[in-house]
Amino acid sequence: MQLIRYIILFLLVLAAQVADAQALTRGTVLDAETLEPVIGATIADAKLGKALTVTQADGTFAIPKNNETQLRISCIGYKALVCAPVANGRYLLHAEVSQLGEVVVTAQENRGLTTSSRIEKHAMEHLQPSSFADLLELIPGGRSVDPSLSAPNNIHIREISTGNSNYATSSLGTSFVIDGAPISTNANMQYLAGAWDAAATNRDNTNAGVDMRGISTDDIERVEIVRGIPSVEYGDLTSGLVKIERRRGGHDLKFRLKADMGSKLFYAAKDFEWDQRHLAFNLSADYLDAKADPRNRLENYKRMTLSGRLQKRWEREDYHLTFSTNIDYTRSLDNDKEDVDQTYTAEDSYKSSYNRMALLAALQLKTKRSSWLKGAELTVSTSLENDLIERTRLVQLSRMTVAPLSKEEGENDAYILPFKYVGHHEVEGKPVNAFVKLNARLQIPNNTVSNTLLIGTDWNLDKNLGRGQVFDPYKPVYTGISSRQRALKEIPANHRLSAYAEENVKWPTAIGTWEMTAGVRATSMLNLSDDYTMNGKLYWDPRVNIGYTLPRLTVFGQPTFIRLAAGIGQHTKMPTMEQLFPDLLYIDFIQLNYYHDNPDYRRINLMTYIVNPRNTALEPARNLKKELSLDINIGGNRLAVTAFRERMTSGFRMQSYYKTFQYKQYDASGINAASLSGQPNLNDLPYTLINELGGYGNYTNGSMTLKEGVEYTIETKRFPVILTRLTINGAYFRTTYDNSIVDSYRPSQVIDNRQIQYVGLYANDDGSVRESFNTNFTLDTDVPRLKLGFSISAQCLWFSTSQRKEVSNYPVQYIAPDGSIHDWQDSDADDLYLRWLVRDYTSSLFEKNRVPFAMNVNMKVTKKLFDDRLHIAMFCNKLWDYTPDYDSRGTTIRRHVTPYFGLEMNIKL
Amino acid sequence: MKKIMLNGILMMLAITLCLTSCKSDDPIPVIPTAMVTLEVPANLENTALSGAHATLTNVETQQVTNIDEAKFIKQGSDYKIMCNDIEAGTYNVHVAGHLDFTLNGVAGQKDFEVSSDNVVISEASHDLKMTISTFTAQGGFVISEVFFTGTSTEEGKSYSGDQYIIITNNSDVTLYADSIAVLESAFLTTDKQDYTPDIMSTHFSVQACYMIPGDGKSVPVEPGQSLKLAVNALNHKTEQPNSIDLSDADFEFYDESSIPSFTDPDGSAPNLDKWYCYTATVYQFHSRGFNAMAIAKMQTSKEDWLENYVYDANYTFVFGDFSSEMTKRGIYKVPNEWILDGVNLSVESVREWNVLDASIDAGWTYCGKVDRDETRFNKSVIRKQDANGKYIDTNNSTNDFTPEAPASLLNK
């Protein structure tokens, strides 16, 4: 195994760490306000003006011992410091633009090379979210949307989603990492097979990634939403990364009570911290109860989370060792029941429960000695889920309906269902995930560049121990179900092994500072049989971000910093368990459909075929991101603009295929119903052999998603007198969806007693282009004297467009019942049967649809009372709106906006 | 030619005889060619007389002259009966026979007898006119009931397998129901679009066409009698006690399918010939009644209709903030002249227009006043009857139908 060899090499490098000992003066350069290390600061001899060295990733430096020199420590963005060297000294640099005491209630563009948005605790307190989904309003391109908690909430970064499940790779490929442990959804197989009803299908979240409803926000200290190119440390993603860090330590006892138009939330937490012992412990719990409609108690979503987090740090002279462990439990429940009084159907209900227990243990080492090894990290996380969907329905059939039962291929008699029964269908999933990550930060001593080499490996396992679809085949809830029961534990476990290396360089020069993060990640799927294309294959994700910061300028008398950055990176998301190992499909054909007044004499004979829809040629979805960004900071007023282009041509999609099946069509017309003494005997019946096209679905890499756009953020300083800060952020997005796989379609029309026997094959179907351009103007005022904060956000959507990709109405080819494929001829459009293969798209369907300007104004207020012990907040979204009517092809379209309110109370004891 | 010659000779002989007799006793003139014109109701076409027989009974002498079928000569749609050498006098005339015809394109037949007493046949008046007045052949097949809502189970769920439509021979002649098709409109009465071309004044656009099979005279329907066409011709009561026994239905909408999810039980009633249907799933009527239903006499072959009676319509579709030019491809059409009867069904709260030409139905009828009205179950639309039990057909279903009437076959 190639990959294993890399890992062994990496371990050898780790083991070969030797500390060097010389006569050196060491020091650490820190930001005076945040006490965070200042990386890449130049340490120079103040007298000679000669650069001696630069600070490393942990802010440290080492210079030859010389007590005579004066040091000049400088770094772009900081005021230079001149002082005498002190052994093991801490040198505090003051930022040119002070951010001290600043309360930021918006998302901030990250100052690092990676394009990302940072959302801090203050912003969340001001926003008053119910779940993580509400935070996305803050990132460029986001707008406030009413919480919709009765269906899964998926993330769509840099995308105008269509909601089409064939383009869900973008949300599937966004990784959520909580305290270092990714949430795996790869073994999620919670879907009701055969379901057609909205109660079930609207809540299906398979292959769509993380359901953000389940992530509570109250424990979160900081979120970083990486929209650009993340470090190679993070894998199994295509579109983005959400890094969540939760609170550790503190001494508070906290309560939060929130109510809005659709939900109620209660949160309690107790924080413990023993400063001397460097020990922290946090306990918290929250409960959310949301209703789709406040008048309907029967359709609701409930969430309960419990969290315990312990951290212990050992501070030694040579190293700091931090051990963190978390235990988290999340339970959520989707309920949808019929009102017994209204419909008499007492039995009808849908219930989906999600129980997740997650454990994390992380060991973090930071060395303080000047060695190659700067730090190492070992993270082990595991999660166990117990998910159960229960669907109960009183089934009352309107006509004789059958349940195919045979698990074998061949002829068999179907079971004729009773007309009335209570069907119960369960889906039991027990996804198990284990994740181990080991990495080390190395540093090659160098006096001109600050550098860190990150090397690491991770291994991920997904397995589902559930029973899967469980139902009584004699009482199916969904009568047309084409799958038979299969225990999920029979599916082999998904193993994924990765290794990565990344070099981080910061090089301060006279003409500016150069920065680079360049790395590569290799991933392979293990435990796949030989016939899979992915078997034994390594997928390489090279990722590079480069930045250049101009020397300090002065504009309008203000210190000004300008940085240009560019990045390119490959990202790979492995297929999920369901995509790799879908259920076998049972395709049944009726050979005889004989009805008799005597139920015992009825007979429905089937021919059953088994199709394995497993696509062994399936490969991972890969997204290539490119971006350019500009960051200008003039005296603390900041403009950040990023232009990006992300092209993913191998997104997962379900595609239908047809093939020919043969069955006997028995002629029952000769049966004398009166003379029967039992079911008709098949041997006595004449039959004809029929060829019929049967369709089945199969996962492919046919979906393309092309994301292009520009994101921008302007943050001003807080204007002194009015105590107000203006944030302008927004984005222009253009998302192109396309399908590279030939689509097939069989018309449903019946001509002369038989469904049309032909299947049309169409090229490049299902594409569309969507655009949107928005700007949010947020004015937030913080009056410390009154302990009052309020913000007004005018969220403008300048326009949005959608346009379907023009496709031909005519198939390129068609399949005849015998399976033969024919090229489409123009004359076929007049054929009695083939004419139905011509689809009815008109040119106006491919015209661009443009929705003009719309603006919503949101207001939020927070007030602290009783020595900050009580904190009251309220929000009103869409308090005022400007959504003018507009004309679309001669029709006036009217738009309506309904405000959304909420109120909350935080108590800190 | 020969016949004319023979007639000529006979006539000459008769004249000779006549002249001879005149010379002798009291002269009773003999009318050489008296003519009885048998008038057939004007709305009948393609009339064919069979087993016809006429008797002229002389009131004075009680002498009976029999005239057989050969003497009935078709003239236009009427018949002339030649009575040669009749003595002038007063007669009772009686004509009987069997008439085959088409009425509005529908084959029909009727036995008739007409009598006319004390008719004077003289030299001056030897052309009689007799009108077949024992039947008027007014009306024809009508839709007398559409039960499209289905029944409700004890648990309040809907059961739609027991839908049916009844067509009744509302005339006083026997009509053949062969090749009459049940049609369901392609357009919804709840979704008005400006379809181009707009063919409604000449054709009915359909999405389902199920025809009563036969060789032309296989399915006679006596005057006032009905045909029950059931979506499933079964005794539904065995499975759903609140439902209907439709095992005695005359025909069944049977959908042959090889897909187990679309199993349609094939009851003992003969199946309608499924010329066309928009869906390969199991056919049933729109259970809220959003379509128009019609019956038409298909006046061409299945092959010809499937090949040539299809068109595409364009319209502008508006939904929310989206509007688009659309094409509805492959709509089958039936000329309005073929249509015997039709009825627009809709629901008041969502109704937008009529999808049948006003000459067929200027009104509309319903079960349920609001969309998804659960009180609509077990109800149907039934055509009103006049004092004589005839169904009222003014081509306006608002007047002609009783909406929300209890289904006539329910609880029987």
Image (tube, rainbow, N blue to C red):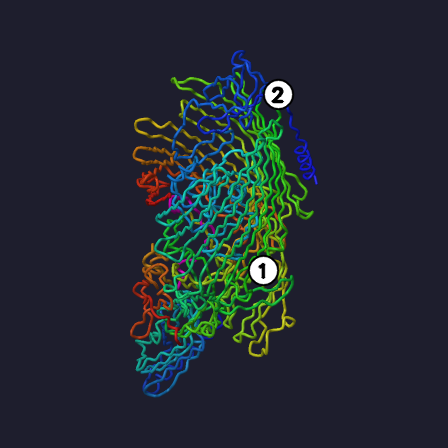
Query: Foreground: A384 or A156?
Result: A384
> Image quarter for residue A568?
top right
Query: Foreground: B86 or A652?
Result: A652
The chief SS type of the magenta part is strand
Asked whether, in this view, residue B194 is left or right of residue A69, the answer is: left
Q: Position of residue B260 (x, y in %)?
A: 55, 63
Q: Earlier in the sequence, mark 1 or mark 2?
A: 2
Quick check: is A793 in the magenta stretch? no
Q: Position of residue A389 (x, y in %)?
A: 50, 57
Magenta-highlighted residues: B316-340
Query: Foreground: B6 or B298?
Result: B298
Asked whether, in this view, residue A833 is left or right of residue A793, the answer is: right
Q: Pointer 1: what residue? A: A485
On screen, residue B215 above or below A751: below
> Image quarter for residue A26?
top right
Q: Secondary structure at mark 1?
A: loop
Q: Chain of mark 2?
A: A
Asked whether, in this view, residue B310 is left or right of residue A651, the answer is: left
> Image quarter for residue B13?
bottom left
The Cα–Cα distance between marks 1 and 2, rounded to whole angstroms, is 72 Å
Q: Position of residue A905 (x, y in %)?
A: 34, 45
Q: Pointer 2: what residue? A: A23
Disc 2 marks a residue whose amino acid type is Ala
Disc 1 marks a residue whose amino acid type is Gln
Q: Secondary structure at mark 2?
A: loop
